[in-house]
Image (tube, rainbow, N blue to C red):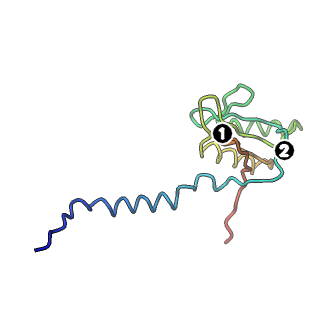
Amino acid sequence: MPPVLDLRRWRFVPLALLLLGLAACFGGARNEELVRSEDVPTEFDVVLLAEKDDQFDFSGVPLTAEALRDAMRYRKDESLPLGSVLLKRGEKQKVTDVHILSLMRVAHELGFRAWVQQKGEIGEIRVQTRSQ
């Protein structure tokens, strides 16, 4: 008589395959809004650092997303340079999706170009609208 397969050993295989499939589909979703660009500026008008609690460091001052919007609006109103903004990793904090989305909203609202530096590469943050 042939040996009977012990199905208890294989009960986690479908779960593992499902998780592997989800990781393959959604693993690269983080950087969809980043676009590699050939016209990266050599100097940026504003350099921001990522801080904890989804805040930004602007010239040594921690700012929330709303305060960042106000600071950039002030620069624009005072005719200070605001054509390009670079977001970099902070001393103790990596750039998160919340940092990127907050900066993307401010850049879209005020009409400047935003860039982010991650792992030594600089990519532009662009708003992509869905066609209806």
Dot 2: element: loop
Q: Residues within 10 Å of mark 1 (few under 14, many from 20)?
A: some
Q: Residues within 10 Å of mark 2 (few under 14, many from 20)?
A: few
Q: Which residue is mark 1?
A: 65
Residue 52 % position (x, y)? 58, 32
Residue at 80% in and 50% down? 111
Q: Quadrant of residue 72?
A: top right
Task: Return the disc, 1 or 2, that comes first in the chain's sequence.
Answer: 2
| Count of residue discs | 2
Q: Can you say whether 10 is above or below 90 in the image?
A: below
For this rendering, which residue is in front, 116 or 9? 9
Residue 51 % position (x, y)? 62, 32
Tell me which amino acid carries mark 1: Ala
Residue 97 % position (x, y)? 60, 46
Dot 1: element: helix
Q: Quadrant of residue 127?
A: bottom right
Residue at 69% in and 52% down? 34
| Left or right position of 104 against 110 | left
Please identify the residue farthest to the bottom as the structure is shown: 1
Image quarter hosting the C terminus: bottom right
Residue at 65% in and 42% down? 119
Tell me which amino acid carries mark 2: Pro
Residue 125 % position (x, y)? 72, 50
Please identify the residue farthest to the left as the structure is shown: 1
| Left or right position of 56 against 7 | right
Q: Which residue is mark 2?
A: 41
For this rendering, which residue is in front, 74 or 81? 81
